[in-house]
Image (tube, helix red, strand yellow):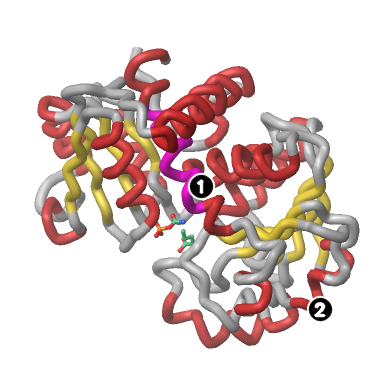
Amino acid sequence: MKRDFLAVTDLSREEIERVYHLSRELKAKQRSGEPHPLLQGKILAMIFQKPSARTRVSFEAGMVQLGGQAIYLAPSDIQMGKRESTADIARVLSRYCDAIMARVFSHNDVAELAAHASVPVINGLSDLLHPCQVLSDLFTIGEHLGRTEDFVLAWVGDGNNVCHSWLNMSTRFRFALRLAIPEGYDPDEQLLANAKRAGLSEIALFRDPREAVKGADVIYTDVWASMGQEAEAEQRKLAFRRFQVNEELLAHAAPGAKVMHCLPAHRGEEVTDGVLDGPQSIVFDQAENRLHVQKALLVFLLKEA
Ligand code: CP
Ligand code: NVA
């Protein structure tokens, strides 16, 4: 049975730990220049309905480093759901390629691809979830804090796809997730309820970001208007103006708290230059680890799952 990665919850805790173990090995090999052609001859199809820098380049570079190849399919190339059905695209790509990664608007599109593909499908971001991001972010936290549990993460900003994937991760690893979100922008009710019901991590919602970041080991933010919400950008700037991650807010967190952002950042909006470029920011380590963790995920899905 092929395995997909549409949500963090598609993997058990033990499987995530296995992926992290492999990530450490692959990262060391990449750094020392030791070849690791674990996916020789394998091909990844990459469908993009939205723009991307990190996801596109880390998956493509990762496949090449593993001895395989990736094929980039731009929004205008295959026009999934318009030129032909998503199900037919899934069936056809499964005959040519060994795995499919897709970045889509509607989460249903990536779920439909997975339902009809005979090869693993990876969610490279949907309006609902960004599981690859949070899978590699917890790995990055592990490198910086020395543990992947028992830390306090303050999410400051929108209850969006990345926030949703943190809620999912909180059902796999135990940590305190403090959500500072303005009214009207709360995360999906069901994902929040599921995370609370799992009972593993402590989850709390705040309207005051200063309260939320008190004692936080990690402060995480993301853009106020995600891809597809550009028309709401001005209205969101008003709603989120008290939620900027700046030097003043950082002073309320634990000393030496780490700052994370999935990038791309809108500097001067959700985060200041001083914080993003400052000594507490780990955003570029975070970006780098997308490469190592996704390589491990590909090896896991194609060879071990
Ligand atoms: N963080 C992230 O997914 O970046 P891209 O949108 O550039 O892929
Ligand atoms: N929430 C952002 C994440 C970008 C990586 C978006 O969906 O645009």
Taking the image as shown, residue 204 lies to the left or right of residue 12, namely right
Rendered position, 207 above or below 1: below
Which disc, if any, is residue 133? 1
Depth check, front residue: 40 or 80: 40
> Does the segment drawn in magenta span residue 115?
no
Mark 2 residue crowding within 10 angstroms, few (<14) / some (14–19) / many (20+): few
Ligand 1 quadrant? bottom left
In the image, the segment drawn in magenta is 287-298
* Residue at figure coordinates x 46%, y 45% from the top left: 290
Which disc, if any, is residue 248? 2
Instruction: Give the amino acid at mark 1.
Output: Gln
In which quadrant is the C terminus drawn? Answer: top left
Label 2 to label 1: alpha-carbon separation: 27 Å
* Residue 269 in the image, given as x and y percentages of width and height: 59, 81
Instruction: Give the amino acid at mark 2.
Output: Glu
* Residue at figure coordinates x 34%, y 59% from the top left: 52
Front disc: 2 or 1:
2
**Which secondary structure lies at badge 2?**
helix
Disc 1 C-beta below 8 A from ligand 1: yes
Rendered position, 244 above or below 2: below
Magenta region, main secondary structure: helix
